[in-house]
Amino acid sequence: MTAMFRLSREVITARGKDARTFLHSQLSNDIAGLAVGASRYAFALEPTGKIAAFARVWCVADDHFVLDVDAGCGEAALTRLNKFKIRVACEFSLESRDVVALRGLNASERTASLARDGAVSAWREADGAVDVFAAAPAEVGSLEDFHRERVRCSWPIFGVDITSDSLPAETSLTDVCVSFTKGCYPGQELVERMDSRGSTAPRRLMRLPSPAIAGLPYRLADGTEIGMCTSVAGDHALVMVQRAHLGIVEQITRS
């Protein structure tokens, strides 16, 4: 069932003839090949491989990009981008903007919604999610309902479910945030090494059945603590599962 929510996102606008090449050199996904009007998610990493920012990158024009991040994360993301901006023709500005979050769309509804002015794809394609940068109407769903859908779709919030201590491989988002065929970017070495060696991350964010309490350890029926619960909404919880327990948790999620 389609639902509409009002959100606030922090938005970094990047303008200049070097905007595309600079963002491509700094982010974990392929920005060089991003078509005008298209968007994709990406991480900005520290040289250690840990996540400094988690953004959606929207190409408005060849020299104009919009990066939006979770509320409260804009300053840190901007600081990280400016850290490596040396002799680059690209200017950044930061603002907070209203977003109308459309969720529960079927395939045809999603396609129609993406044709609206200011519309951009959200989450994974199969999640039926579109965000529209516009003032929200008076009647929208509750944030509680939004987070229920977010957790059901296993979509994290930066600073809550994943943090600056997280590695990309721990987020369960490498399929949508990381290109393994692009050129170099800060932090790439660890990402590529873990992928090429088939290494298992120390933790992994996973969706598990509730009951659970955010901020407390998640326990199996036998009392075993398997990791920290980060978000709970409705029938599901997001849990940062420790590597030693991934096997049994994967069996639970398949059953």
Image (cartoon, rainbow, N blue to C red):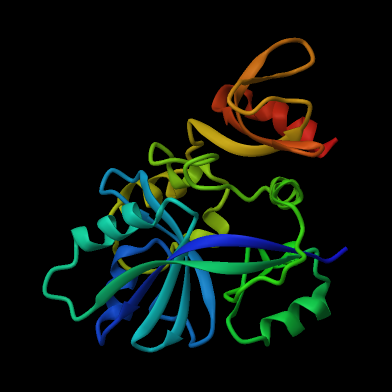
Give the farthest residue toward the right.
1
Percent coordinates x, y for residue 173 in the rendering: 55, 52
From what the image shows, is residue 46 above or below residue 251? below
Residue drawn at (48%, 88%) of the image: 36
Quadrant where the N terminus sits is bottom right
Residue drawn at (30%, 64%) of the image: 26
Q: Quadrant of residue 204?
A: top right
Image side of residue 62 versus residue 200, left or right: left
Image side of residue 131 versus residue 145, left or right: left
Percent coordinates x, y for residue 72 in the rendering: 43, 50
Give the farthest residue toward the top.
223
Give the farthest residue toward the front.
138
Front-most of residues 213 and 5: 5
Q: Quadrant of residue 78?
A: bottom left
**How many numbered marks, from 0 up?**
0
Percent coordinates x, y for residue 211 in the rendering: 78, 26
Image side of residue 61 versus residue 254, left or right: left
Image side of residue 24 versus residue 119, left or right: left
Residue drawn at (61%, 21%) of the image: 216
The answer to whether one can see residue 30 in this image is: no
From what the image shows, is residue 156 above or below residue 238? below
Quadrant where the C terminus sits is top right
Percent coordinates x, y for residue 254 in the rendering: 81, 38
Front-most of residues 24 and 211: 211
From what the image shows, is residue 140 above or below residue 160? below
Front-most of residues 116 and 109: 116
The answer to whether one can see residue 100 in this image is: yes
